[in-house]
Amino acid sequence: MKRLLVPAMAVLFLACCAGAPRVVSYYVDRGVMQYFLMPSRFHAGDAGLSIDFAIRVEADQGEPAICNFTIKAKKDLPRAIRRAYFRLLDTGGEVELHAIAVLFIERLDKEIRITSTMEAADFRRLLHSREVTLSVESDAGEYIFNPARGFYNTIRDAGIEIIDES
C-alpha cells in the first residue's frame, strides 16, 4: 500500500501544479477587472530575477501596470536602480519602467525587491512581443536579463485574457 501511495501523491501534486493559472483575474467593480500575472524567471550571468505584473482595466482605459521584480545576485547586489526597461527585440523599441523604487533589500539572501510602473499601452506592447530582454541599470552595473520560456507563456495567456476581454 505504501508503494502505491507515494507515486499516487506525486502524480496528484504534478497534476495540480501543471494546471495552475499563469494569469489570475479579479472583479473589482462594474466594468473594472484586475489581472495578476504570476511571477516569471529571468537570468543574467550570476544574477537571477523574478518578475510579476498587476494591471486594472476599465472599458478600454487602463491604469498603469504595476511591475514588481526581485533581483538575486551572487556578487554585487544593487542598492539603487537608475533605469529599467524591456527591449522588444522582435518588434523593435523599448518599454520603459517608471516610478522605480526599492521596496526592501535582504542582504543575507542577496536580494533586492523593486516596484515600478509602465503605461497601459506599453504593457499591451509587451504582451504582443515574442522576444524581449529586461535591462536594469544600477549602482552595481548593468544587467541584461533573458526570460525563461515560462515568461512567454504567461504574457501569451495574459494577452489572450486581457485583450480579448477589454
Image (spheres, grey):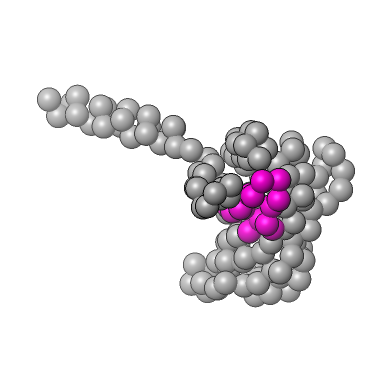
> In the shown orientation, is residue 157 left or right of residue 128?
left
Rendered position, 63 above or below 24: below
Rendered position, 130 above or below 103: above
| Residue 124 in sight in this render | yes
* Residue at left offset 62%, top offset 72%: 102
| Residue 70 sits inside the magenta stretch | no
Residue 14 coordinates in the image, percent (x, y): 37, 32
| Front residue of 137 and 68 | 68
Q: Quadrant of the C terminus?
A: top right
Residue 97 location, quadrant:
bottom right
* Residue at left offset 80%, top offset 45%: 88
Residue 71 coordinates in the image, percent (x, y): 60, 61
* Residue at left offset 58%, top offset 50%: 32
| Front residue of 6 and 19 | 19
| Front residue of 106 and 75 | 106
Residue 65 coordinates in the image, percent (x, y): 66, 56
Per the rendered image, the range of residues in magenta is 51-66
| Residue 61 sits inside the magenta stretch | yes
* Residue at left offset 33%, top offset 34%: 13
Q: Which residue lies furthest to the front in this view?
A: 30
Q: Residue furthest left?
A: 1
Residue 117 location, quadrant:
bottom right
Task: From the image, give the main secondary structure of the stretch colored magenta.
Answer: strand
> In the shown orientation, is residue 107 left or right of residue 141?
left
